[in-house]
Image (tube, rainbow, N blue to C red):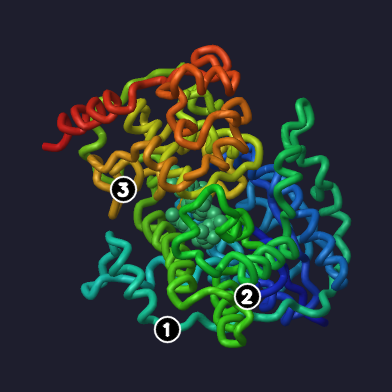
Amino acid sequence: MTKRALHWFRDDLRLADNPALVCAAGTGATYCIYVLDDRAERRALGGATRWWLSHSLEALAAALERRGGRLDILCGDPAELLPAFAEAAAVDLITWNRRYDAASVDLDAALKERISGNGTAVRTFNGSLLNEPWEVTTRTGQPMKVFTPYWRAARERGEPEAPLPAPTRLEAPALPDSLGHRVRSLPELALRPTRPDWAGGLREAWTPGEDGATQNLVDFIEDGLGGYADGRDRPDRDSTSRLSPHLRFGEISPRQIWHALGTARKSGEAKGSAADAEKFLSELGWREFSYHLLFHNPDLATRNYDQRFDDFPWKHDGEALRRWQRGLTGVPLVDAGMRQLWTTGWMHNRVRMVAASFLIKHLLQDWRTGEAWFWDTLVDADPANNAASWQWVAGSGADAAPYFRIFNPVTQGEMHDPAGAYVRRWIPELAGLPDKNIHAPWKAPDDALKAAGIRIGETYPAPLVDIGFGRQRALDAFAMIRG
Ligand code: FAD
C-alpha cells in the first residue's frame, strides 16, 4: 500500500522552503491541514492578524490546488483533532514546523507523545528561524541576554542551509467520510470583519500570501536595500522591506531572504552596500534574538523581564490610553504612527519606538496595555517580536533601552521626518503648517496656525502632556524602583 502523510500548516503558510511539507510530500499522498484554534486558553489572534490569516489561507489553498494538493481547514483543539484525523485517515507520518511560544511547545510535546503512542511517526522541523532558540548560547551553555554577542555567536555558526524548492506535485488523498463534517470553509471561520468592514486600508496596503511575500522581497532588493542602513530610520520614505507580516505567517523564511540577498549581491542585482546588507541581516537577527528570549522566558508578553518593574507606579488612565490608540494625543509623530497603524495594520519601526515610548514614559501607562493594542491592530503582531520590543522600549527587557533614554517625539520627528511628509500624510489637518512647526504645532505662531486653518484644542488636540514635564515625571517614577 502507498504511504500517506499529513502536514499540519501553522505559521508556515508557504510551499517553498518548507522542510516539514517537503518531508511529508516525499513520503506519499499528503493531507494538508490547518487548524484554527479559537479556544479561550490560547491568546486569540488580533483583528488585523485574523484578516491577514484569512487571505493567506486562501492564497495557500490556491497554491496547493495548482500542484494537485488540497487544504483542509478544521476548527478546535489540535490536541484532539490531529490524532483523530490521523487515525481516521490512517496516515503513516505527521509533520509540522515548530513554534516557540509556551503553549505551542507544550502542545507539540503532548501531541508527539500521543501520536507516536498510536504508532504513527511524527517529524518536526525548524521552518521559521535561522537558528533554533536553544542553539545559540553563552560559552557556558546559558541563554544570551545581550543582542550583540548573541548575533555574533549566531553569525559564527555560518551560513544557513540553502532553501528547499517547493514540491512540484502533491497528491491529495480523499477525505474519509468520518472526517467530512469536520472540515470548514474559509467564510465559516469568520476571520474577516463585516460589520463594520474596517479592512479597506489593509486591502489597499498588502498582498498576503507567498507570492506577495516573494514580490516584496524582490522589490526590496531592487529598490530598498540601497541606503537601507540609514534610510531605515526614515518613516517618510519607503525604505524598509515590509516583510514583517509575511515573516510572521511564514509566507517566506529567513533563510530564503538571507540567500536571495546573497545571490543578488553577488550578481550585482542588489544596489545596496555591504553595510546595508549587514544592517538588514542584523534586523533579522533581532527577530531571532526575540525568539530566543521568548523561548527562554515564556511569559515575555506579560511579565517584566527585569522584575524591578513589578513595582513601577503605572498610572491607569483609560482616557489617555484611548487618545493614544486613536491618534489624538496632540503630538504629531505619535498620532501619525497610531493612525498609520489603524489604517494599514503596520507602523514604521522608528515611529513604533517613539509611540511606545510616549505611552510608557510620557503617559506612564503600563507597557502591557500598548502591547495588547499592537497585538490587536498590527498585521505583523508576533508573539516574540511584539513582546520583546515593548519590553525593550519600557526598559524592563533584556538588553533594553535604559529607562532614562526617553525619546523626545518632537526632536525625533525633526530628525527622521524633516519635511513633515509622514505627519502630513497621516494627519491631513496639519498639512498646511510650515515644516518648522509641523512636529510641535502647539508652539507655532498664531499667524502660521491661522494660515493653516488650525485651532489647537479644536481642529487638532493640545498635547496630552507637556513634553518636558512628562519626561521629568517619568524619570522621577523610575527613581522609585531603581533600588
Ligand atoms: P525591515 O527593517 O525591513 O526588517 C526586516 C525584518 O527584520 C522585519 O520584517 C522583522 O521581521 C525583522 N525586524 C526588524 N526590526 C526588528 C526589531 N526591532 N525586532 C525584531 N525584529 C525586527 N515586529 C514584528 O514583526 N511584529 C511585532 O509585533 C512587532 N512589534 C513591535 C512593537 C514595538 C513597540 C516596536 C518598537 C517594534 C516592533 N516590531 C515588531 C519590530 C519592528 O518594528 C518591525 O519588525 C518592523 O518595523 C517591520 O517592518 P519591515 O518588515 O519593513 O522591517
Please tell me the numbered disc located at residue 19: 2
Q: Nearer the viewer, residue 376 or 468?
A: 468
Residue 457 relative to residue 123: left or right: left
Residue pictured at 55% horizontal, 68% vertical? 225
Classify 10 Å Cα crowding around label 3: few (below 14), some (14-19), many (20 and above). many
What type is the residue that disc 3 sits on?
A: Gly
Mark 3 or mark 1: whose residue is earlier in sequence: 1
Q: Is residue 394 above or below residue 221?
A: above
For badge 2, the amino acid type reads Pro
The disc at residue 441 is none
Q: Residue at x 44, y 68 (%)?
A: 279
Amino acid marked by disc 1: Gly
> Is there any visible trace of residue 468 in the rendered image?
yes
Q: Report the residue at 44% width, 24% height from top.
A: 444
Q: Quadrant of residue 218?
A: bottom right
CA distance for labels 3 and 2: 33 Å
Pointers 2 and 1 in contact (CB under 8 A)?
A: no
Is disc 2 placed on a helix, strand or loop? helix
- Could you tell me how far apart the alpha carbons at marks 3 and 1 are, in whole angstroms? 28 Å
Quadrant of residue 393 in the image?
Answer: top left
Question: Which numbered tag is attached to residue 397?
Answer: 3
> Residue at position x 68%, y 44% from top?
76
